[in-house]
Image (spheres, grey):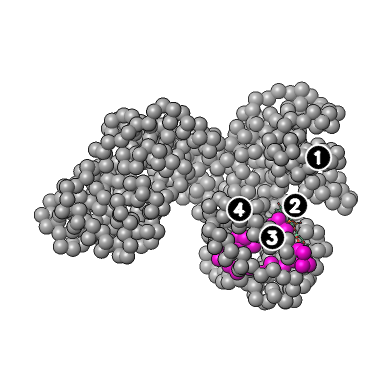
Amino acid sequence: MSVIAIEHEGDIAVVSVDNPPVNALSQALRQGLWDAVGALDVDPSVAAVVLICAGRTFIAGADVSEFGKPPQPPHLPDLVARIEGARKPWVAAIHGSALGGGFEVAMGCRFRLAAPDASVGFPEVTLGVVPGASGTVRTPRLAGAELAVELVTSGRPMGAAGAARAGLIDAVIEGSLRDGAIAFARQALTRPLPAPVSARAVTAPDASFWSEKEKAVARAARGATAPLRALACVRKGVEASFGEAMAFERETFLELRGSEEAAALRHVFFAERAALRPAALRDVEPLPLRRAAVIGGGTMGAGIAAAMREAGLPVTLVERDAEGVARGLDTLRGIFAGNVRRGRLSEAQAEALVRGVTGTTDHASLAEADLVIEAVFEDIDVKRAVFDAVGRVCRQDAVLATNTSYLDPRSIAEGLPGPERFIGLHFFSPANVMKLLEIVPTPQTSLRTLATGFAVARLLKKIPVRAGICEGFIGNRILKLYRAGAEALVRQGIPIAEIDAAMRDYGFAMGPFEAQDLGGLDIAFLQREGARAAGRHVPETLGDILVRAGRKGQKTGAGWYDYVPGERRPQPSPAVAELLAGEIIAKTSMSRRAIAEHLVAEMAAEGRAILEEGIAESPAAIDLVEIHGYGFPRWRGGPMFATGMRGNAGPRGA
Ligand code: NAI
């Protein structure tokens, strides 16, 4: 079946693209458009052409199945030039998304129209490349250098209204896009046509503009190179001739396509796609989710409730007493107020979200919930008592989940009537922000319950990773080794601040010690103390020494670093140097790069053990855990990928 159809509405030809699911720019589609230009150019009955797409979106972008393969003609830059050079003016009618190559095709058209909810943008940098078919050269000609820099270096899409204000879109069409576009095309024929985009003038900003942008882009990129290369392309795009700039962009695109960074980002992209719908659950229907309940309204419970509300579910929040309820609801309000401050929610939306939460101490209200998530204290007796009560009041088919970090889900579920509906759903803090969801079935968990766990992740727009049962599951288990590795370096005489700086240079937002200061050293300390109290041998860590000296992190004004009250900037601490003096056994020096590579190798070594034990299903799953739960730089592909363990995420087995 052809992916292109041509219809005639009087003297307007309507070229419809139908290449499900997202009208990706496959070779067949490129060829179809190429041929359409040729045919319509010589059709005397046609005065103008409307380009529109079937299905849920305009041409959403490149065809991911062609990633990593040698490009086949017609090449996209040639196609865009051919559309621009057509004898009849083409009008792009955009609904859904026009991203990357999709928007480049639209920029080849003489006009661009959009439905009100459409968006446009250049996500190429998120795959380690730059736009390869004039995105960095035509965008500044349409909307100026500033916006072009923003779009191509961030990868973030832009809504139709903003795009229209900026000049990327000529008009937003309410109602039928097809009819509106045909009417627009007819109108346009009554006036002189604007110049093709490539022939439009652009003002080049001065050198200080570029040095400012370089600094800002480098800061946001955390070591990734594609955003800076995209910036260089836009600069060329406004300073050089159109032809020179196109050649520069193409060369950059082709070079980056073969880069390690692009390979890493493709790996993560395919791993994420595979994670959302595991093959083993393809035919399993999850439980429909209409109402959720969260038990425990502390840090995690409130965050989980917020995430559920943002996904549209009504939520019951159960606490142990009235103060607990009030505190939980306050925390929730605080979360939404933060989103209002950041411009992500309106006041009215925030109020509606809060109204959708019913705070209570009464377990009877759980009878209506399809999904119950427990986030009470990390204490096996408290958790068991909760599930004892929950098991009695909940519907038999409701899914019951624990958010435990370290406890064995099997012992939490012991004695629960209907253990097949029980599962571990391990969220990360802050739960309404962090993308990772570890999904931990017990041997008794049914496939339907497991499928519901994955459905929860999709609903909350999180990345699910299935984990087996062990202390700390995948993420916290690797974290423990990472921290131990960092402490071992301190014992070898490497300064704490140097280790943190090394990991920041590697691409983490924070090093291991500053991150502990932010989260608090006491949580892991208490966990170790608990294990010691239970008679297990847990060696004294450097963190234990600090906590025993009252240094629990930023909240006590002192942890691995000192903090000036009211400030979050870590200051190297003479007190810590003194406390740990007896523990430092060498005076080693190591480059930052060697430090980072060493610690990543430690993570990967634990990752290998996790794989051998069957706790994680693939190296890619471990990479997703580290990227979405622990701030591992995405552009490095995760610890397994970065250390050469590359398996099973992409269509090429890449
Ligand atoms: P938290 O101490 O902030 O909150 C626990 C809440 O549970 C308190 O508000 C308490 O009043 C309430 N609660 C205690 N017993 C209850 C009962 N019987 N019925 C109803 N509510 C009860 O603790 P946090 O940090 O929210 O942790 C909760 C769980 O989430 C723990 O299992 C923890 O291991 C896990 N977790 C924590 C993470 C974190 O970063 N804090 C990350 C991932 C999981």
Residue, disc 4: 338
- Circle 2: element type: loop
Sequence-wise, which precedes: disc 3 or disc 4?
3
Q: Residue at x 60, y 60 (%)?
A: 307
Q: Residue at x 59, y 48 (%)?
A: 628
Residue 297 is one of the magenta-drawn residues? yes
Q: How far, Cα to Cα, is label 2 from label 1? A: 26 Å
- Circle 3: element type: helix
- Circle 4: element type: helix
Sequence-wise, which precedes: disc 3 or disc 1?
3
The residue type indicated by label 3 comes to Asp
Sequence-wise, which precedes: disc 4 or disc 2?
4
Asked if disc 2 and disc 1 are in contact, CB closer than 8 Å, the reply is no
Q: How far, Cα to Cα, is label 2 from label 3? A: 32 Å
Q: How far, Cα to Cα, is label 3 from label 1? A: 28 Å
Name the image quarter holding the N terminus. bottom left
Q: Which residues are magenta?
A: 296-324
Residue, disc 1: 551
Q: Dot 2, crowdedness within 10 Å: few (<14), some or many (≥20)?
A: few
Q: Is residue 378 left or right of residue 195?
A: right
- Kindly indicate the quadrant of the structure image that contains residue 118: bottom left
Residue, disc 3: 330
Q: Is residue 384 left or right of residue 475?
A: right
Residue, disc 2: 471
Asked if disc 3 and disc 1 are in contact, CB closer than 8 Å, the reply is no
Where in the figure is residue 266, as x and y percent of width and height?
Answer: 48, 44
Q: Is residue 73 left or right of residue 500?
A: left
Where in the figure is residue 256, as x and y percent of width and height?
Answer: 43, 35
